[in-house]
Image: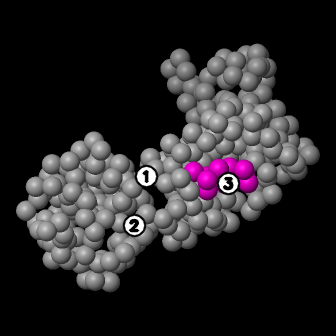
Amino acid sequence: MAGVADIDLNLLIALGALLEDRNLTRAGARIGMSQPAMSAALARLRRHFGDELLEREGRGYRLTVFGEQLLPTVRDALRQIEATMQRSPRFDPAASDREFSVAASDYTVSILADPLLRQVKTVAPRIRLQLQPIPDDMASSGQGLARHDVVIGPADYGFPGRSRELFRDRFVCVLDPANPRLRGGALSLADLAELPHVVPAFGPGRRTPVDRVLDELGVTPAVQVTVAGWLTVPFVVAGTGMVAITPERLARLAARSVPLAITSPPFGLVELVETAFWHPSRAEDPAVRWLLQALADAAGQL
């Protein structure tokens, strides 16, 4: 097996372009290599891996099974190399054009984007943000965390790495203002047990604090609609006989666009604690420290 000193990093760059573009001409144009040079690189890569990587399909190419398996690993390696080469003992946000990768839920983006982008535009106008979904493998390994500068998620999801609380949001009930179950601006536990619910899905094993509280109270929601993430939940509820339990900031944001009644839940205060997580290898990166402070300052404006 080749050691690091034996690896031609230009080949890794060519490999990433070939696997993503699946076309020698386009891949070469993207990284500044001629088609003959890309053909030679592909031949070397095939010998190295003992696999064709790209196979003819009609007038184009498709990835082999091994090529498909290799693609996410190569992407991660290139991101890590880029992040390493961008490291500096100092960071000047006003002069930097660094791109940061931040993984967060649609809810977090909808809440934090406005104050964060206003702040970045003022103090770091050339900074670029790449906002992506939370990786599915966050809780099972450090791989998902390592792919991003910062991941923002609930404090109780068991995510690895170092962490810093950003903000809290209490849960509220949302339903149509004309729902007959809404008496005196309130709902009972019996109402929650009997009304049809709209609920978010976040992937295997990811439950909300409300799920756990309802379990403790012996209330099993009658789920009628399941949607991906928080963002669309209040909009699905509007104009129906259904109910949902969502973070309050999201509910009030949605209520600007659709008619919604927002009421305190009948089980007391339950909060969503949104937290920033980062890989220990980034802990001393002054750019990441700046980003964490920018996120904290944006959260402080909520």
Label whose residue precedes the other's in the sequence (1 or 2): 1
Residue visible at 67% across and 32% down in the picture = 125
Q: Amino acid at mark 3?
A: Gln
Residue 9 visible (yes or no): yes
> At which x and y percent is residue 276?
60, 60
Residue visible at 28% across and 56% down in the picture = 226
Could you classify mark 1 by the number of other residues whose Cα lies within 10 Å: few (under 14), some (14-19), or many (20 or more)?
some
Q: CA distance from mark 1 to mark 3?
A: 20 Å
Q: Under tag 1, what secondary structure? A: helix
**Pointer 2: what residue?**
170
Q: Are marks 1 and 3 in contact (CB under 8 Å)?
A: no
Identify the image quadrant of residue 11: top right
**Number of dots carrying numbers:** 3
- Main SS category, magenta section: helix
Q: CA distance from mark 2 to mark 3?
A: 23 Å
Q: Under tag 3, what secondary structure? A: helix
**Pointer 3: what residue?**
293
Label whose residue precedes the other's in the sequence (1 or 3): 1
Q: Using the image, determine if residue 218 lies above or below residue 110.
A: below
Question: Residue placed farthest to the right in the image?
Answer: 5
In the visual, does 205 lie left or right of 259? right
> At which x and y percent is residue 256?
30, 44
**Pointer 1: what residue?**
107
Q: Under tag 2, what secondary structure? A: strand
Q: Amino acid at mark 1?
A: Tyr
- 294 drawn magenta: yes
Residue 46 visible (yes or no): no
- Residue range corresponding to the magenta coloring: 288-298
